Amino acid sequence: MARLAVFASGNGSNFQAIAETFQKQNTHETALLVFDRKKAPCRERAERLGIPAEYVRYPGHSREEAETEILKILQNHNIDMIALAGYMRLFTPVLIDGFPGKIINIHPSLLPKHPGTDGICDSFRSGDAELGITIHEVDYGMDTGPVIVQKSFFRSETETLESAAGKIHALEHRWYPEVILDLLNSLRR
Ligand code: GRF
């Protein structure tokens, strides 16, 4: 059984979808939530789900110092892989090289289109006919790592930002847990 850490900064709906899928399937473990905003709702979700949560303080520290702290936390919890789910930070080589090839992210657009912090609005406003999600490996750039899976839909004639966002989140919750499970199954421990 491999141990996953999910990193989130906000709502945490993907974290919850992953944790519930894992708990149902009883294969691998969502062993830890790492969060960087004290009042983030993901923290309460972790409490309700009975999953340990560790707050990481960035203000007053360099990113490298914060990531050195994160590496210690991950080691203490015996973490095998990291899934970012709405974690609003870029990593330095300290963390990326500490977990080579084992950090993945989900982004709410069809990368390389619309990277950055507002993938849903940016893709909706672009007028693209096809919208969707990307699950990818994390490298040193912002939303630039190799793509693992993309899922998409075509916008309807009556599509609104809200309806598109709902479809995007539904795709995320449907596919992210499954892709992570596949990756964990293929890990050599
Ligand atoms: C998701 O749309 C994800 O694609 C993006 O951040 C959002 C996080 O949502 N990276 P939630 O916190 O999991 O609800």
Image (cartoon, rainbow, N blue to C red):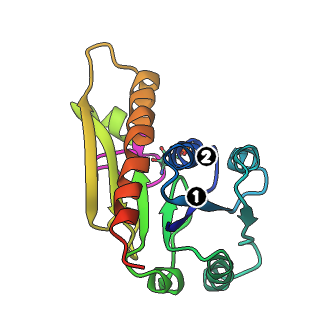
Amino acid type assigned to the residue bearing label 2 in the image: Gly
Residue 30's label in the rendered image is 1
Q: Is mark 2 within 8 Å of ligand 1?
A: yes
Q: Residue at x 51, y 69 (%)?
A: 90
Residue 49's label in the rendered image is none
Q: Residue at x 37, y 63 (%)?
A: 185
Q: Is residue 9 left or right of residue 24?
A: right
Closer to us: 159 or 183? 183
Which quadrant of the rendered structure holds the C terminus?
A: bottom left
Asked which quadrant contains residue 148, the reply is: bottom left
Tag 2 residue: 12
Decide: is 79 above or below 171.
below
Q: Which residues are magenta?
A: 108-121
Asked if residue 13 can be seen in this view, the reply is: yes
Q: Residue at x 61, y 85 (%)?
A: 64
Magenta segment's dominant SS is loop
Decide: is 150 above or below 78.
above
